[in-house]
Image (cartoon, rainbow, N blue to C red):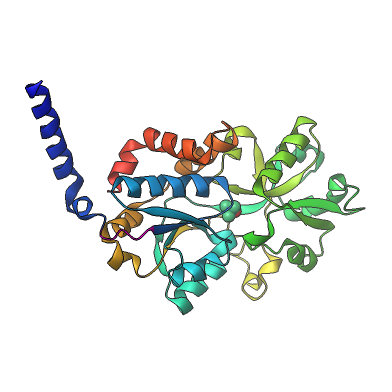
Amino acid sequence: MIKQLMTSAAAAALAVSLSGAALAAAPESDDPIIIVQNNWTSQLVLSTVVGKVLEGMGYTVEYKPSDSQLQFKAIADGDMHFQVEAWEGSMKGAFEKAVAEDGMVDAGTHAAETREEWWVPAYVADKCPGLPDWKALDKCAKIFATAETGDKGRFVGPPADWGKNYSERVGALKMNFKAINVGQAATLWAELDAAAAKKEPIVLFNWTPNYIEAKYKGMFIDFPDPAKVAECKDNPNLCGAPRSGWLKKAAWKGLADKYPAAWGVLQKINFTSENIASASLLVDVDGMTTEAAADKWIASNKAIVDSWK
Ligand code: TMO
């Protein structure tokens, strides 16, 4: 019994010394750290992962849902404290404006490279020669037509707050498509599942990293590349999203002073594509709740989580 007690006391002492000075000092404040939540799966799971890690360090954590465009001003103002998944393809403008004009902090770039773009499942390529070129897609517009879109093809677009102006792109490129936005991400996948089950043509908004890669073969449509085509600067509607975009973290500038150890964690977080895709898979394929998925993600990625502290 005594031996057992000593062993666990020794183990506890060792754990404290291993976890380092930053951990020992947390929490520096009992005020809640407010973590931003957005409306897609990997963001919800991974922000919960980070919240649980901070709670484990003694912090009080709250979550606040926010619009993917408006969130950066709210973070700059300290109404919310950080965001773990800011995507270049849909958020670059709002992110950079908040840094330049409102004092939001760019808290670093993840290893994952991202793309957010029109996408088709692989079987569509058999019905539409020349893909993934956007002009080839446009020639096949009729195969995507529905009652709702008449003789135009239907593009299944993202929820409106993701900052995408696909009607404007369709107009600028004079495409034979009509962009119909869904209300929430789950509708994108329901549309894809329904079409794929019958091998019906569908073109929808998708992104990488995402669980979709593990479930369906497919391809992004290549629109004019903003890294290569000069006109994209003047009129982004003439072009696609970046083909190799960044994924960043965003923070309130007061975070480093008020919660230094939490700021240290945020700086160290560095998601790979696999880290992000696996987070969405736990919910969108395995059907777990956000909470359960976060616990499982932490258990499966213990070395990574420990490296943040
Ligand atoms: C911002 N998103 C990853 C949903 O395109």
x then y, percent, for residue 246: 49, 58
Magenta stretch, overall SS:
loop
Between 142 and 86, the one lying in front of the other is 86
Between 58 and 298, the one lying in front of the other is 58
Can residue 131 be seen by looking at this rendering?
Answer: no
x then y, percent, for residue 126: 78, 37
Is 301 positioned to the left or the right of 237 in the image? Answer: left
Is 144 positioned to the left or the right of 205 in the image? Answer: right
What residue do we see at 61% from left, 64% from top? 226
Image vertical order of residue 73 relative to residue 282, above or below: below
Image vertical order of residue 89 relative to residue 126, above or below: below
**Quadrant location, the N terminus:** top left
Image vertical order of residue 47 relative to residue 81, above or below: above
What residue do we see at 52% from left, 35% from top? 282
**Magenta-tinted stretch:** 28-32
Image vertical order of residue 264 relative to residue 198, above or below: below
Q: Quadrant of residue 32?
A: bottom left
Q: Quadrant of residue 267?
A: bottom left
Is 262 positioned to the left or the right of 22 in the image? Answer: right
Between 102 and 259, the one lying in front of the other is 259
What residue do we see at 56% from left, 31% from top? 286
x then y, percent, for residue 91: 56, 63
